[in-house]
Image: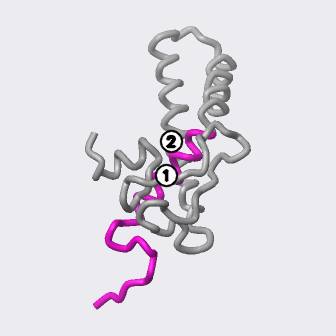
Amino acid sequence: MIKDTKLYSILNFKCPYCHLGDFFVAHPYNLMRTGDLHDRCSECNGRYTIEPGFYYGAMYVSYGMGVALAVSIWVAYLVLAPDAAIPWIIGTVAVAMVAVGPLFYALSKIIWANMFLDFENPTGAHRSMD
């Protein structure tokens, strides 16, 4: 996989600017530190939080991933076990959501960061619109 792509940064939890430094303090399943970010990249010194509340928008990304997972499980049950009871399907969706919750939380943050942080502006300074 090419290191200069946003996909590399997302899948490896690397800096959205340089794709080298670590984005998170710990692994997503370290529940004491889930979602904790470094303040700056250890490689390029890029700021990860450019304004207060920047990562609130990541909730929309997480919601989309959760809906995609729930619909996928529902369709899989309809195709593979069409006679399955509704409580089993709902239970499976609930267990899956709890199991992947920390991963979706981390992925939503790194996806959000890669959508809005770019290599040309690693300090997060405001640019003039000339």
Mark drawn on residue 22:
1
Type of amino acid under label 1:
Asp
**Quick check: 94 left or right of 69?**
right
Seen at 47% across and 57% down, the residue is: 112
Q: How many marks?
A: 2
Q: Mark 1, residues whose alpha carbon is within 10 Å: few (<14), some, or many (≥20)?
A: some
Q: Position of residue 111 (x, y in %)?
A: 45, 52
Between 74 and 16, which is closer to the camera in this rendering? 16
Secondary structure at numbered mark 1: loop
Callout in the foreground (1, 2): 1
- Inspect the magenta stretch and tell me whether residue 111 lies in it: yes
Based on the displayed image, in which of its 4 quarters is residue 125 positioned? bottom left
Q: Amino acid at mark 2?
A: Met
Residue 71: x and y in percent read 50, 31
Quarter of the image for the N terminus: give it.
top left
What residue is shown with label 2?
A: 65
Residue 36 higher or lower than 102, as above or below: below
Examine the image and state in which quarter residue 118 appears.
Answer: bottom left
Q: Is residue 7 left or right of residue 98?
A: left
Residue visible at 48% across and 37% down in the picture: 68
Q: Nearer the viewer, residue 75 or 38?
A: 38
- Residue 62 lies within the magenta run: no
Image spot of residue 123 (x, y percent): 44, 75
Q: Secondary structure at mark 2?
A: helix
Q: Residue furthest right?
A: 32
Query: Residue at the front extreme?
Result: 43
Labelled disc at residue 43 = none
In the image, the segment drawn in magenta is 102-130
In 3D space, how far apart are the residues under numbered discs 1 and 2 (Cα atoms)?
23 Å
The residue under the point 64% across, 19% down is 86
Residue at (50, 41) in percent of width and height: 65
Task: Depth check: give the residue in front, 25 or 109.
Answer: 25
